[in-house]
Image (tube, rainbow, N blue to C red):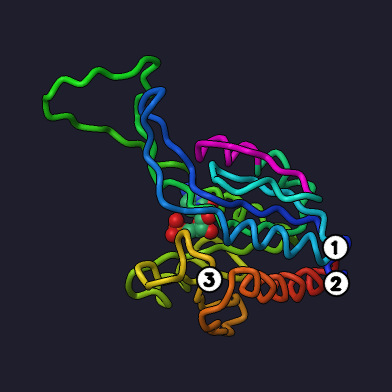
Amino acid sequence: LTPKDLSGLKLLVSAGPTREYLDPVRFLSNPSSGRMGYALAEAARDRGAEVVLVSGPTCLQDPWGMEVVRVESALEMRAAILERYPHLQAVVMAAAVADYRPAEVHRDKEPKTGEEKTLRLLPNPDILKELGANKGNRVLVGFAMETREGLHRAKEKLLRKNLDLIALNYVGREGVGFGSEENEVVLLSRTGEVEELSRRPKREVAHRILDWVKLFWKEYGH
Ligand code: C5P
């Protein structure tokens, strides 16, 4: 039986990839399955939190007992999150938001010409950084996926985005991270603590992250 130790917490979790369309049938994206975010949302629901799950396209079913908002692009995800932000006490950004989107989106399918093509990209807004700039007494958690210099980069992101906690994933390790059922992460807190979580099911990783959310949530006096 899970204790309802997060009852009263209004939490938004983002999950999955975003799709950045070039035309009606083509997009830029990444291999995020959404599993880490869904595990977080479900674990928080089980602990009594009021959960909103903002999800990019995934093949996972909508979890019961929460508001599920389906979006595609980074701009749609941003709008869905900012609209709800005033009423939230915590946000966990587990989504793999695309850093860029095509500068032009064609209304019709682009014909194949056989010629070389150049794609112009515009930077997407950093949603989490915007949330951090207007943090108030909310708890903010981010993820960092790195192939190298992980701890250093994650710490830099924690500070730059004004987060309470960042979960560092090393991409490219067998059986963990993108698409898999398990994850191996290092948690870094704004208070300088480092917690290494050895490989384990994403649901267990989720519960540890939520323990940290609870700590800051209580500290911020909600
Ligand atoms: O800077 P980087 O993309 O590595 O940061 C990752 C964290 O920031 C993740 O929590 C991700 O959800 C969030 N992010 C965001 N908006 C973006 C890019 C990343 O909120 N445009």
Disc 3 residue crowd, few under 14, some 14–19, many 20+, Cα 10 Å: many
- Look at the picture and state if 109 lies above or below 32: above
Q: Tell me the quarter of the image containing the C terminus.
A: bottom right
Mark 1 or mark 2: whose residue is earlier in sequence:
2
Mark 1 or mark 3: whose residue is earlier in sequence:
1
- Residue 66: percent from left, percent from top: 78, 49
Please name the residue shown 55% across and 45% down the image. 59
Residue with the most extreme top position: 108
**Numbered range of the magenta stretch:** 66-80
Q: Disc 2 residue type?
A: Asp
**Splitting the image into 4 quarters, where does residue 9 fall?**
bottom right
Tell me the residue that label 2 is attached to: 5
- Residue 4: percent from left, percent from top: 87, 69
- Residue 97: percent from left, percent from top: 48, 48
Q: Tell me the quarter of the image containing the N terminus.
A: bottom right
Residue 54: tell me if it is visible.
yes
Tell me the residue that label 3 is attached to: 182
